[in-house]
Amino acid sequence: MTYDDNNIFAKILRGEIPCDKVYEDDHVLAFRDIQPQTKVHVLVIPKGAYVSFADFSAQASEAEITGFFRAAGKIAKDLGIEGDGYRVLANTGVHGHQEVPHFHLHLFGGQPLGRMIKPPQG
Ligand code: AMP
């Protein structure tokens, strides 16, 4: 899948639209989800142009992958959700219901989260 330079996270990375930033370094930007589903709901994105988890895991450099996952863990810790626990989620592709085609992790926390996913209907 070709990367769409006009996706909303690309615009956030270029500073064309604002975000509620919680962390930034050379490889990573993290900001609060605009429609939070839990008390703490933060999105962690690589600065590189990767469409999905599949794209990132296959194509990103070792430095990008290491930097990304180290940052994600640090962000969760700094948000104060590590102690009680949290959930990391990467929606991928059509079945994963990925809406924004720039790879991102969701960090959910700040409250009990229930079962892993809602069982699909039918
Ligand atoms: P996904 O289904 O994993 O692609 O989820 C995309 C997420 O991006 C959703 O939870 C949206 O609420 C969130 N989102 C969309 N636009 C923005 C924005 N401008 N700032 C912050 N979060 C956003």
Image: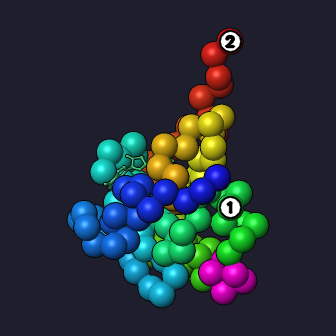
Foreground: disc 2 or disc 1: 1
102 or 34, nearer to the observer: 102
Report helix, strand or loop for mark 1: helix
In the image, which residues are magenta? 61-66
Q: Residue at x 62, y 74 (%)?
A: 69
Is 65 magenta? The answer is yes
The answer to whether residue 16 is left or right of residue 91 is left
Provide residue 38's location: percent of width, then percent of height.
40, 46
Disc 2/disc 1 C-alpha distance (Å): 30 Å
Provide residue 112's location: percent of width, then percent of height.
49, 45
The answer to whether residue 84 is left or right of residue 9 is right
Provide the residue designation for mark 2.
122
Say how many tags the image has: 2
State if disc 1 and disc 2 touch (CB < 8 Å).
no
Q: Residue at x 65, y 22 (%)?
A: 120
The answer to whether residue 58 is left or right of residue 7 is right
Q: Quadrant of residue 80?
A: bottom left
Q: Residue at x 33, y 66 (%)?
A: 12
Q: Amino acid at mark 2?
A: Gly
Q: Quadrant of residue 52?
A: bottom right
Q: Is residue 27 visible?
A: yes
Q: Is residue 109 visible?
A: no
Quarter placement of the C terminus: top right
Provide residue 29's location: percent of width, then percent of height.
43, 74
Residue 18 position (above or below residue 98):
below
Provide the residue designation for mark 1.
55
Provide residue 66's location: percent of width, then percent of height.
67, 81
Q: Residue furthest top?
A: 122
Residue 34 position (above or below residue 121):
below
Is 63 magenta? The answer is yes
Q: Amino acid at mark 1?
A: Asp
Graded by Cα atoms within 10 Å as few (under 14), some (14 to 19) or many (20 or more), the crowding at tag 2 reads few
